[in-house]
Amino acid sequence: MKPTQQKQFDKASFQDSVKKHLSATYATTIETASERQWYLAMGRALAELTTFDLLATEADERIKKAKSVNYLSLEFLIGRLTGNNLISMGLYEQITEAMAELGHNLTDLLEEERDPSLGNGGLGRLAACFMDSCAAQEYPTVGYGLHYEYGLFKQSFKDGRQQEAPDAWSGVEGYPWEVARPELAQEIGFYGHVEVVSENGKEVRKWVPGMTVKAMPWDLPIVGYESNTVYPLRLWECKAIAPFSLASFNNGDYFEAQHALIDAGNITKVLYPNDNHEKGKTLRLMQQYFHSAASVRDILRRHEAAGYTLASLPKQETIQLNDTHPTIAIPELMRILMDEKGMSWDDAWAISSKTFAYTNHTLLPEALETWPESLIQRLLPRHMEIIFEINHRFLQEVRAMWPGDGEKQAKLSIIQEGFHRMVRMANLCVIGSYAVNGVAALHSQLVKKDLFPEFDAMYPTRLHNVTNGITPRRWLKFCNPGLSALITEKIGNEWPAKLEQLEGIAQFADDAEFQKEYMAVKKQNKQRLADWVSDNMGIELDTNAIFDVQIKRLHEYKRQHLDLLHVLALYHRLLKDPSFDMVPRVVFFAAKAAPGYHLAKEIIFAINKIAEKVNNDPRIGGKLKVVFIPDYRVSMAEIIIPAADVSQQISMAGKEASGTGNMKMALNGALTIGTMDGANVEIREEVGDDNIYIFGLDVDGVKRVKAAGYNPYDYYNADPLLKSSLDLLLGDEFTPGKPGLLRATYDSLLDGGDPYLCLADFASYVEAHEAMDAQYRDQAGWAKKAILNTALVGKFSSDRSIRDYVNNIWKLEAVSR
Ligand code: 26W
């Protein structure tokens, strides 16, 4: 165990550094600097401290020699760094004081930071939590990602419809926390052809790229909680190099060179905004190769610099692939080992296949990546040859296992046959990795049974489970200071690094005094959110209402439209049933829809239109409000999550791999209403059946209903409340004078076949909500359940997830500094 470190901090020199940056970096003065410039100068001054530790960590001989994990991800949804880094550095109070003396309020300064939105949703945020937990526990780690110029689009609403705007996250001034590492730049090729040359009497294949670009790394410091360890999140930016594409010009391949010229400047321009839906764009594959190639080369550079031989690569380095997006790293490593380092296939494969591990994050068929063989052939001709060879050797194994079974070969082959032959990236990953994992117990079971049963038979020790987690530093200590203080008062201050200690507050779950304090904190957090909504949206909220929250990407499988149906049911009852009584409720949504996902955008539109009407309908006496918070992002989650009473985790069973918002809200004392899906199953195991509201079909139930030939009309016709609620979408109730504007959602649930069984789960969902409503009337009983949620979800610390990876997959040791 590392000793708790208290940073040496010299306030006066820190203040000098801030002032120096104001003038030297931002060309302003103490008198004239804007709030934003003060934030930037403070950020630079802090980054100087972390850069010092980053370089010291990098230079540490024991760390250089130790085995490390390389986390390859196209997305790192890190959120604002300043506040979190201050907590990790243990300097929050000191900096508050130092800045106050300079006339500035730290909380206001922190609001000046733009979120680096370098990810879409769950997968990107998980990568960020994992970096935090690796650094906190001092496991040698490098995160490798892309330095997108534009992060995930900014969302606003115009007449209820989603509008997208570019997100230039680093601003014109640049991001204060990043440091350029030009000495570590790499050159990356594309296109071209393969030549056969003879070297020492051996035939060697060499790729001659038709175009080359530069990969320039930027390091962001990931500060270990209360430690001096700082590991880099290394983000590659693509730069053009001139003369641009000499080889292609010389070969007379003028057109290809021109084409390349256009693409080069674009490679890291923008994050692709698709979540769980694969689009197959050339530029996306270029991003993937650019990221993989730069990262693999950097890993080999570090490995060789530490004095190790290539043969010892798997002993010293492990490369974790965050979904299939960096799969091309596998043939890239093979290519380098064979074509550049002169190894045989067998030697190269012995290394490569023991170096990579792959995490699967989704079972949705439309999210499983396949790339046209013809595209890979053109963009990366040598890699395509290597993929064929991997496949050829693999299919021999398949034939040995299932002789004469052509169907098995077709199913397992990396190449999907057809008019356009496609490369299945997940198959390549499973074949080329020493470990494959799902992200929650149920999901991993489905990966084994439904997605990869034959791979499991061929490689019985390869498939694992590592249940996801969240960092308690950002998702409790930083975002919920009130609850953090209350917890610390009861059980001391070690819990942010040892979340299982939260169990110690379970003994106060029945303590009336503690319940009052706990609920008072919740009330303050609800007030903070209500103030935000009032200031930014002009909607006034009552904090005595139940704050009912669904925050996640908009997707049919996540069923925001089921939540909306419940809103319609409440509205209908308030209007039509004089005996109906309910605790006032505010139903919050926050979600971005992929710009090309039509139905998701229609659902957003429907929610917004319904909100407009409901929020201003005098007939319901303010009992129901609907708030769609625009531009959902990490910093918004930090305000919403501590304020939630009810956490909606209502995906159709079998579709949500894990979920992590479910963990964040339970930790902050929201009660979950959820299906038996993803990590909900394990949350229920931890908090107990009495402290969670499970409803709807489970995985087997879904299979049964689908197999029997599901017809949503059966439910529609049989349930008057469901029918009345749905029918509200047809008229002009919410779109005065324009009936039918909300038809898309209605149609998808009826004539569209309701592929995610919203109608089948509706009655059970309404019932679970009624149980919650009844429970909320007994505040002491509710408080007890909320406290037990906080107390019993210690398992979902990402520190535990990382220890699972370390012990079961990565096999490496912590090195304390
Ligand atoms: C190629 C398009 C694309 C883009 C992103 C396909 C798939 C993705 C991600 C894998 C989607 C994603 O974020 N999955 C989420 O991963 C989280 C972390 O493991 C899980 O908690 C969520 O359940 C899962 O949906």
Image (spheres, rainbow, N blue to C red):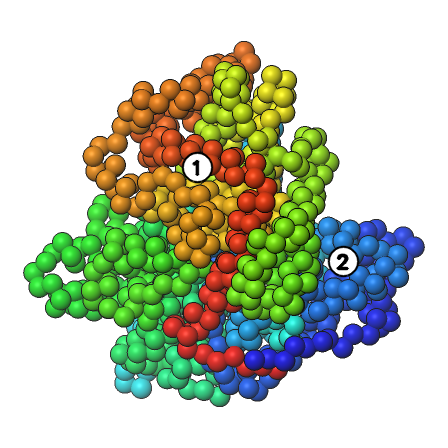
Residue 768's label in the rendered image is 1
Give the amino acid at mark 1: Ala
621 versus 395 height, above or below: above
Q: Which residue is mark 2?
A: 40
Q: Label 1: how many residues lie within 10 Å, few (<14), some (14-19) or many (20+)?
A: some
Image coordinates for residue 162, horizontal then vertical, percent: 55, 33
Kindly identify the residue that appears in the image at 39 percent across and 31 percent down.
Answer: 762
Upstream in the sequence, badge 2 or badge 1? Answer: 2
Q: Considering the numbered disc 1 on the image, is that residue within a helix, a strand or a loop?
A: helix
Kindly identify the residue that appears in the image at 58 percent across and 27 percent down.
Answer: 624
Question: Closer to us: mark 2 or mark 1?
Answer: 1
Kindly identify the residue that appears in the image at 54 percent across and 28 percent down.
Answer: 582
Image coordinates for residue 739, horizontal then vertical, percent: 48, 14
Give the amino acid at mark 2: Leu
Left/right of residue 638 with respect to residue 13 in the rendered view: left
Image coordinates for residue 191, horizontal then vertical, percent: 40, 59
Q: Considering the numbered disc 2 on the image, is that residue within a helix, a strand or a loop?
A: helix
Quadrant of the rendered image containing residue 494: bottom right
Asked whether residue 20 appears in the rendered view, the answer is no
Image coordinates for residue 400, horizontal then vertical, percent: 12, 68
